[in-house]
Image (cartoon, coloured by chain):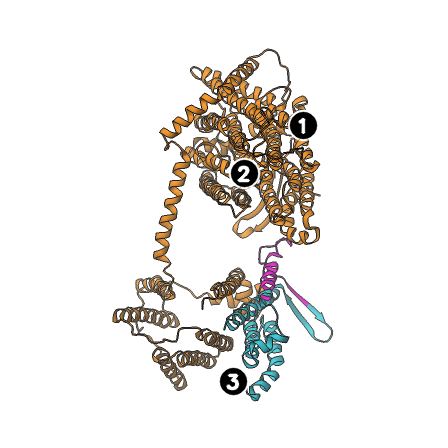
Chain colours: A cyan, B orange
Amino acid sequence: MTTLITKTITKICLPLVILFSISLLLAGHNNPGGGFIGGVMFASIISLVYVVFGLRYTTAFFNPDWSRWLASGLALASVTAFAAIPAGHNFFRSAVEFIHLPVIGEIELVSAALFDVGVYFVVIGTLLFILKNVGEDT
Amino acid sequence: MDSSTIVMLAIFIPFIFAFLVPVASKLLKQRIGWFAVAIALLTLFLILKITPIIVHGDTIYGEIVWLPTAGLTFNVYADGLSVLIGLLASGIGVIIMTYSNGYMSTKEDLPRYYQYLLLFMGSMIGMVFSANTIQLFIFWELTSFTSFMLIGYWNDKPESIYGATKALVLTAIGGLVMLAGFLLLQVITGTFDIPTILHDESMIQAIHGHELFLITLVLIFIGAAAKSAQGPFYIWLPNAMEAPTPVSAFLHSATMVKAGIYLVARIHPLFAGTDAWFILVSGTGMITMVVAGFLAFRQTDIKAILAYSTISQLAYIMTMYGYTTYHEPGIGVAAATFHLVNHATFKASLFLVAGIVAHEAATRDIRKLGGLRKEMPLTFIIACIGAFAMAGLPPFNGFLSKEMFYESSLEMGVALGSPFTLLIPAIAVMGGVLTFAYSIKFIDGIFFGRRQTRGLPEHIHDPPAVMLIPAAFLAALVILFGLFPSIPVHAVVEPTTAGIIREDVELHIKMWHGFTTPLMMTIITFMIGLGVYTKYGAIAAWQDRFNLRYPKISVNYYYDLLVQNAQASARTISSITQPGTVKTYMSALILTVVVLVGIPIILLGADIIPQSLNFDIAVYEVLIMLFMVIAGIAAALLPAYLPAIIALSALGYLVSLLFIYLKAPDLALTQILVETLSTIIFLLVIVKMPQKFRESIPTTTLVRDLIIAGAVASTVFIILINATQGIIPPFESLSHYFIENSITLAGGRNVVNVIIVDFRGYDTLGEISVLCVAAFGVYNLIHSRGNKT
């Protein structure tokens, strides 16, 4: 697998795919995409890096603790779910706000999107945590 | 600040800070105990702040809306009764946590200890201020749970584990029975709200006249009895003494066991004034009082004496709450409430003394202890104050409430008429005699008699101030409440009593109230009590002979029998349901789906191939499906792991290709990514699988698997073909609702995503939690194999 071609392509793809995964996450509310698919996208490019460059080589300089990602994602999702209660609304009530920025134009802020970010991190964390542990076990 | 907000803060502060204990312990190290003391003080201060409102005769109600559409609110209700127990929980909490700073060795896992103590305190406060029965139940079970964790604090001792399990099993079962009672109460009254029921005279009439009256009362009372260790449930409390002594003082004498008393007092207005109430509550109380008093007298461990005495004293209170007649439903209420306060002070101080003695003398066995009064003079004084109050000697607070106990017993006896006129006071005196005897035994055994040298440290002395001051403070309260009973009476006893019997009361409690019948009963009690104590040897010998002859007259015998049998049958059942092979689980899972989904389909009369089937299929669709079939067959038949997996993932990619043709970009993208990742994980896992891929499979297995696979395939086929044609009759498609409302209700145009994060957000939260659990499950599976592979 680890030919020069795959290595080079992986290097080029890495930033692009990460950006794409973020754009999938952000676009999710109105266009195809969302936290789950964005997260899986992110996880797949990282796993490609793991496979192509080898787990040991990669973790030498890039070694995040994925369990923290899934924990913080779950925390973020729970907080956004509960945040509606102090505001006097139903559990899980989503807030929608439209704001106008000078260059970009109108932007829609939905609190549900924050929940989606939580989902994004949980998906990334879970997949890569499992992958890395299974991979390290050989 | 709004007074209901203060109540809610008092509930939440212990919980919030309990979770911050591990963080704080990084900063404070061994002084973490003082952090817990500060939190308890803050809570106590908050409850004291609302006390004047209660003393004034008002009640407090407040709510936080939780899920209004489902009618769920978090609401709090404060009256005299709840403030009384709330003050006990936080006040004794402050004292116990201070004492723990001296008692607990710094080598122990202190954050865990204080965390559970704070959680317990929060649960207790949450329970007493709960304004609906469901919320009360939740906090109730939380106190059982924290009690379990604290009894089992030294989790390497089998006795601790046994005691913790026993307490949890009995109190949690009691709690569940109580929940059933609450549900019946809801059936009768139509509400879970406690203040609504308490303040509505017509509802109380309805309860009294209802046919479910008796069963509701019995169910709720079982919960209370289990928590307060009354009747046959008493057996958990002595085993709970395996907890660290401050925990025993806090949970198992002063507060948690009072939860049952609290519940009895809480439901008193609903059920009292009936024969059933008197027979159940007072009957249980009187039997428990005498039996536990006798057992306390027989113990040799000083903590066990206190444990059984707690059961007996709680039975006093129970009995008094049970005193009721049709005309006067609340004969003993004031006395019971006063005794509740007094018992908390003197019993907690005695537990602290027991802790001091065990800490300094390194034993709790009364046969080894003795003659310590010269070496521990201060401890001796405190112990005397506590024990004399318990025995009912003047001028301590126990004397006053015991007099009131005798007085209400007399009144009850007179009200019931012969033969109860004599019987009830006689039982009361019997309880008093035993109490007197074991109180004397406690003092005599530890502080008088011959100083033993064998098995005791050479130098025994009073403990450090941090342990002595909390005990001394409680002893001072015992004297204060004895000399000036109007202080606790005005502050808490009167409002509590008024809340229970629902009319204003004014109590005048004096030390000397003339040469009355109760005083004569007290004198008789002391005389017989002394006599019983001197005859200890003969009584002990008689009981030992009795136990030897009838080993089966013991609740513990049946508890152990039941628990052991439960373990054995659980093992049998789980060896059938959990054989450990993935194949069995999968078969069970998918067959269930086939049955649950297939049967309704047949019942609804769906055709296997509908008449109106539309065969308008494009050529490329046919081609893709053909390849899918080939890939599927290849995955099943290929002779090695690697090609089989490749075939399987080829099948997955073909599905995503089909999604693209069918104009479902989301699904296609998801399918491709999921397929890729699962292939990678698959490849990583098969390296470790045994490489024997195709063993010879017995024909029976093959046939069975083929039948299962065929059943699944045909079910899915029939569902799909019917669903896509829209001919499964009674169901209307849900998608219209989501498509129409996704922009107006959730502000998003991607309907799938809006469903995930908004409409069904709760489901998603559950799903991502499952993901996390699965991730850690995989981690554990991989790392728990050890180095065996």
Q: State which quarter of the image contains the C terminus of chain B.
A: bottom left
**Three-letter residue code for mark 1:** Pro
Compared across the picture, whether B637 is left or right of A95 comes to left
How packed mark 1 is, by other alpha carbons closer than 10 Å (few <14, some 14-19, many 20 or more), is some
> Residue B194, labelled with which disc?
2
Of circles 3 and 2, the one toward us is 3
Of B75 and B454, nearer the camera is B454
Of B575 and B690, nearer the camera is B690
Q: Secondary structure at mark 2?
A: helix
Residue with the mark numbered 3: A1
Q: Is residue B183 above or below residue B722?
A: above
Q: State yes or no: residue B164 in magenta.
A: no
**Three-letter residue code for mark 3:** Met
Residue B411 appears anywhere in the view:
no
Look at the image and give the residue range highlighted in magenta: A69-98
In the rendered image, residues at marks 3 and 2 fall on the same chain: no
Residue with the mark numbered 1: B377
- Label 2 resides on the chain identified as B
Gap between marks 1 and 3 measured at Cα: 83 Å
Of B549 and B281, nearer the camera is B549
Q: Residue at x 34, y 69 (%)?
A: B712
Gap between marks 3 and 2 measured at Cα: 69 Å
